[in-house]
Image (cartoon, rainbow, N blue to C red):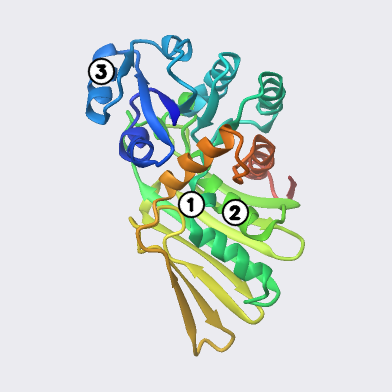
């Protein structure tokens, strides 16, 4: 069994990853670390982890941990990923891994030197609904893909939330802008060549709170908007000459809507519905990661892919400061 350690008691860990690790068929939760030992102990007791540490360094030094999950604030991801690699641990780190694509190649070099697995935690690429979207597009179910349309938004104006703190890596693009880009790239196997963007920032927080983005993939376009201060919504649509695919709950399946995609024909007279009941994308993610870390052949989201996705986000930020296109 793969022995997991978790750095911090963050909400995403408590609500999604720790339950997934506990339910996984090939892993166990071994340790929790927090700067507050009482919080680490309480969470360890809640999820049945035998070890609790009052510092992240103590956990990284533990012989009872094979790999770590890092859900720290975004601005700390690169630092603690590097420390975990140096300690010889496999690393699953929350997205976004970095705030600049240039920060990732040194981690690749370090990963290779230490011979460990390091992945950015894009759970969506493990969900069968996205694997099905990719299969449908590749098999010509919608003919030539012409346009991808997306939206991702929620409402959060809490000044204490890290998503609204610029120095911690907050903002809509780092938090949720990565999802329309990664799901489009995953589904099509294509990379954008250039982008245009309109970006609005909060006058108090300084974080980006709204973006409207257009990305040119050469053969097709992606357009999407996202916001941290709009009513909650998420959707992705892949529109081709012979039909279109609608992903009803693309990023938080089972929360925003059911686990399903709809394939519509050309004249909108028929639709096939593909359902994936009970699918737990976080569990699929941690199980695939553990198998790959132990020498398996599971497809995982590599650091090389992280570089490509972060380059898109970097280009969107640059495009938001100018008129016209910005090269990715």
> Which residue appears at 59% of the width and 45% of the height?
298
User: Looking at the image, is mark 3 or mark 2 nearer the viewer?
Assistant: 3
Residue wearing tag 2: 213
Q: Earlier in the sequence, mark 1 or mark 2?
A: 2
User: Looking at the image, is mark 3 or mark 1 nearer the viewer?
Assistant: 3
Residue wearing tag 1: 226
Residue wearing tag 3: 41
Dot 1 surroundings within 10 Å: few (below 14), some, or many (20 or more)? many
Where residue 259 appears, as percent x and y from the top left, is 40, 62
Where residue 255 appears, as percent x and y from the top left, is 33, 55
Above or below, 323 against 19 in this view is: below
In front here: 326 or 151?
151
> Which residue appears at 60% of the width and 60% of the height?
223
310 left or right, relative to 13: right
Cβ–Cβ under 8 Å for marks 1 and 2: yes
Query: Visible in this render: residue 95?
Result: no
Marks 3 and 2, how far apart at CA: 44 Å
Marks 3 and 1, how far apart at CA: 37 Å
Where residue 221 appears, as percent x and y from the top left, is 67, 63
Quadrant for the C terminus, please.
top right
């Amino acid at each position: 069994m793969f022995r997991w350690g978790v750095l911090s008691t963050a909400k995403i860990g408590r609500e999604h990853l720790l339950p997934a690790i506990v339910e996984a068929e090939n892993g166990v939760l071994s340790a929790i670390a927090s700067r507050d030992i009482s919080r680490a102990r309480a969470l360890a007791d809640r999820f049945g982890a035998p070890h609790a540490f009052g510092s992240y360094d103590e956990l990284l030094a533990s012989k009872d941990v094979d790999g770590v999950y890092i859900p720290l604030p975004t601005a700390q991801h690169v630092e603690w990923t590097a420390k975990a690699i140096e300690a010889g641990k496999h690393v699953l780190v929350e997205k976004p891994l970095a705030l600049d694509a240039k920060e990732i190649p040194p981690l690749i070099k370090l990963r290779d030197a230490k011979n460990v697995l390091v992945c950015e935690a894009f759970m969506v690429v493990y969900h069968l609904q996205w694997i099905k979207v990719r299969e449908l597009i590749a098999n010509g179910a919608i003919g030539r893909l012409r346009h991808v349309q997306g939206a991702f938004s929620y409402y959060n104006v809490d000044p204490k939330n890290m998503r609204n703190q610029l120095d911690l890596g907050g903002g809509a693009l780092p938090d949720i802008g990565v999802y329309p880009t990664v799901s489009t790239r995953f589904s099509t196997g294509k990379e954008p060549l250039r982008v245009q963007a309109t970006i609005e920032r909060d006058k108090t927080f300084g974080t980006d709170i709204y973006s409207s983005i257009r990305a040119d993939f050469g053969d097709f376009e992606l357009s999407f908007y996202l916001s941290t201060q709009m009513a909650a919504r998420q959707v992705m649509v892949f529109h081709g000459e012979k039909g279109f695919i609608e992903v009803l709950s693309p990023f938080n399946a089972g929360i925003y809507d059911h686990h399903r995609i709809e394939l519509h024909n050309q004249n909108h007279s028929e639709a096939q519905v593909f359902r994936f009941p009970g699918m737990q994308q976080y569990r699929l993610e941690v199980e695939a990661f553990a198998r790959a870390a132990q020498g398996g052949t599971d497809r995982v989201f590599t650091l090389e892919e992280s570089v490509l996705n972060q380059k898109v986000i970097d280009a969107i930020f640059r495009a938001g400061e100018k008129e016209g296109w910005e090269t990715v």
